[in-house]
Image: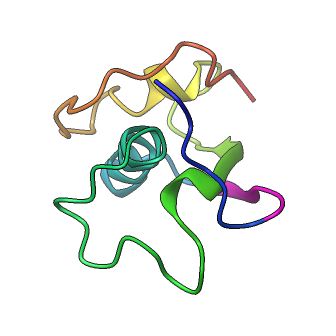
């Protein structure tokens, strides 16, 4: 699917501190909405000129041994997280 990122000149780089349920939902939402024109489910598809496709996760941190050393794609679904997989994530969301 094409990336529809084009509302800002450079990606907004984000680091996640904690890879829990909220982070899992955020990551899946960025991956899904950043690659489609679909906006159903988003209250505000553009905030301050920024769209989901403008956001790039560049780092993440967690202290839970079940998540440490895993890729972000794996860590967001490790226990004790209980979020559903709503969007398949590419394995390239690598280990940091």
From the viewer's perspective, is residue 74 above or below residue 19? above
From the viewer's perspective, is residue 91 above or below residue 32? above
Is 78 left or right of 49, judged from the image as shown? left
Is 12 left or right of 33, judged from the image as shown? right
Q: Is 27 in the magenta? A: no
Residue 11, how many percent across, how many down? Answer: 76, 55
Residue 33, how many percent across, how many down? Answer: 38, 48
Closest to the observer, 10 or 13:
10
The answer to whether residue 61 shows anywhere in this view is yes
Closest to the observer, 35 or 86:
35
Residue 22, how many percent across, how many down? Answer: 35, 57
Q: In the image as oriented, which residue stretches furthest toward the bottom? A: 48
User: Which residue is at a point 63% across and 55% down the rendered structure image?
Assistant: 55
User: Which residue is at a point 58% across and 42% down the rendered structure image?
Assistant: 63
The answer to whether residue 67 shows anywhere in this view is no
Q: Write down the region rendered in magenta.
A: 9-15
Closest to the observer, 69 or 50:
50
Displayed quadrant of residue 27: top left
User: Which residue is at a point 61% across and 50% down the rendered structure image?
Assistant: 5
């Amino acid at each position: 699917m094409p990336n529809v990122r084009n509302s800002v000149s450079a990606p907004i780089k984000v680091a996640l501190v904690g890879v829990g349920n909220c982070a899992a939902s955020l990551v899946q939402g960025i991956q899904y909405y950043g690659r489609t024109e679909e906006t159903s489910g988003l209250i505000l598809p553009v905030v301050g000129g920024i769209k989901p496709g403008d956001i790039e996760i560049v780092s993440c941190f967690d202290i839970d041994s079940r998540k440490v050393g895993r890729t972000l794609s794996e860590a967001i679904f490790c226990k004790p997280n209980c979020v559903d997989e709503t969007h398949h994530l590419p394995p390239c969301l690598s280990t940091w």
